[in-house]
Amino acid sequence: MAHLKLQEEITSEVSTNIINETKKKLGFVPNMYKKLAHNSALLDAHTYSYASFRVNAGFTPVEQEVILLSVAYVNNCEYCMAAHSFAADNMSKVPTEVTNAIRNGEPIPDSKLSVLSETTKILEERRGQMSGTEIQDIISAGY
């Protein structure tokens, strides 16, 4: 199989296969994947963990995007926010008012999604540390 040329470097067969599968599935290759393709282990780990999150985390597609958008917000990642806003609107069918609220740091009109977003932000900001009250809030919301 021919290797895919990315930014003047030839990637490994592992990266080439992942890039080709991604293009077939999405119709394009995200820029982040092109960067990660220079290290096959990183690209493989990212795509595996992302797919596992989507299938095994126990969250609906809407909840998944709320989590990913909330992480992007905390990290002030414009690229991630744009990519997941697109996915939220076009693939996961997140209500526009929810996506806009997260992007703008405003209250989310859906109370369950609001608790999920706030919990995600706390986990991201505090590296997994939550108070007993915060844990109870997410449990009381039905998670």
Image: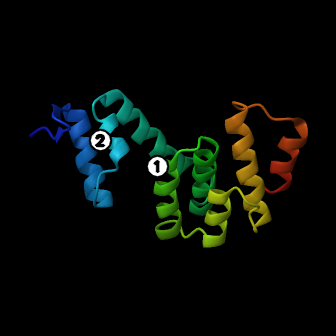
Residue drawn 59% across the image and 68% down it: 94
Q: CA distance from mark 2 to mark 1?
A: 14 Å
Judging from the image, what secondary structure is the residue with disc 1 in?
helix
Q: Identify the residue under disc 2.
A: 34
**Residue 95 seen from this side:** no
Say few, some or many: other residues with alpha carbon within 10 Å of mark 1 (under 14 / 14 to 19 / 20 or more): few
* N-term mark: 2 or 1: 2
**Residue 105 seen from this side:** yes
Q: Nearer the viewer, residue 68 or 107?
A: 107
In this view, which residue lies farthest toward the right?
A: 133
To which quarter of the image does residue 60 belong?
bottom right
Which numbered circle lies on residue 46? none
Residue drawn 82% across the image and 56% down it: 141
Residue 135: image x %, image y %? 83, 42
Which numbered circle lies on residue 79? 1
**In this rendering, is residue 83 above or below 43?**
below
Q: Nearer the viewer, residue 105 or 86?
A: 105
